[in-house]
Image (tube, grey):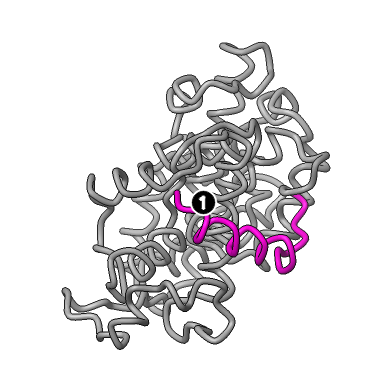
Amino acid sequence: MDSTYTDPILAWYEANARDLPWRSPTATPWGVLVSEIMLQQTPVNRVLPVWHEWTARWPTPSALAAEPSGEAVRAWGRLGYPRRALRLHGSAQAIVERHGGEVPDSHEALLALPGIGSYTAAAVASFAFRQRHAVLDTNVRRVFARLLAGDEYPPKSQTKAELAQAEAVLPQDPPTAARWSVAVMELGALVCTARTPRCVDCPVLDKCTWHLNGRPAYDGPPRKGQTYAGTDRQCRGRLLAVLRQAEGPVEKPALDIVWSNAPQRERALDTLIADGLVDPLDDGRYALPT
């Protein structure tokens, strides 16, 4: 990529990057993998305390793999989307079985782990092993949409054109490419934000196509904000909270009392069971998976 982009963004990152433990030189590949799963659809301030608890309790994949999957769900707390806890547990088991307990440094091997998609495989290969991969999260896609394409927002779903563009502008030197990826990600998180971008603080404002074109308004499909109150997601969270806080299996009335809408409650409970997050026991009680 032209150094007129890379140099100012990397210099900005050097001066403004948040001090996050998974970015530390002492961070392990496992710590990076845990952070990437936790940070999906969850802000940093909510992830930090849970990440510290997880890596203290389970500092290696082997430590997590040795525990029941229900303990991962319990320790997930209120991060949301708790199937991610099961995916991490499944990945830990696969790492032990296939890679001797060490997180693999191969992008292909990472991608083959349970629940690891293309983004997470590229992110871990880049941030843990300093390899050259295009890392396209929501923040990076938004920066590139504005800086390079002149659009306020990227397409709703990642396109082949976006990936090709990201790969085309990726620095050739692998360690520099890895640092570039996290720098663009940080720029999107702190400056080139979705709703109120702080363009005055952008290190490449004079090169931003969207800004130079007069910041044209987004004219794609309506962008709907996520709702939570009253949804099945909230109901699932309430039900899981009962099980996380219990020392053992619970009776059905303990679940019924936390959500008054019975049809919705039963539907949410059914989906938790189907997702492997709740075990229905033969005696009619419910528990976290073992």
Q: Position of residue 202 (x, y in %)?
A: 55, 77
The magenta stretch spans which residues? 1-21
Residue 159 x, y percent position in the rendering: 23, 50
Instruction: Say if the magenta span includes residue 99.
Output: no
Q: Residue at x 46, y 63 (%)?
A: 139
Can you tell which quarter of the image residue 67 is in?
Answer: top right
The front one of 11 and 85 is 11
Q: Quadrant where the C terminus lies?
A: top right
Q: Let me know if residue 2 is in the magenta part.
A: yes
Mark 1 residue crowding within 10 angstroms, few (<14) / some (14–19) / many (20+): many
The residue under label 1 is: 82
Q: Secondary structure at mark 1?
A: loop
Up-down: is 235 above or below 212? Answer: above
Horizontal and vertical percent position of residue 81: 47, 55
Q: Amino acid at mark 1?
A: Pro
Front residue of 8 and 253: 8
In the image, is residue 87 above or below residue 113? below
Left/right of residue 218 with respect to residue 183 in the rendered view: left
The image shows residue 268 at horizontal and vertical percentages of 36, 59
Q: In the image, what residue occupies the spot 42% across and 72% down?
A: 207
Look at 68% across and 68% down and name the residue there: 45
Residue 151 in view of the camera: yes
196 left or right, relative to 94: left
Q: Main secondary structure of the magenta part?
A: helix
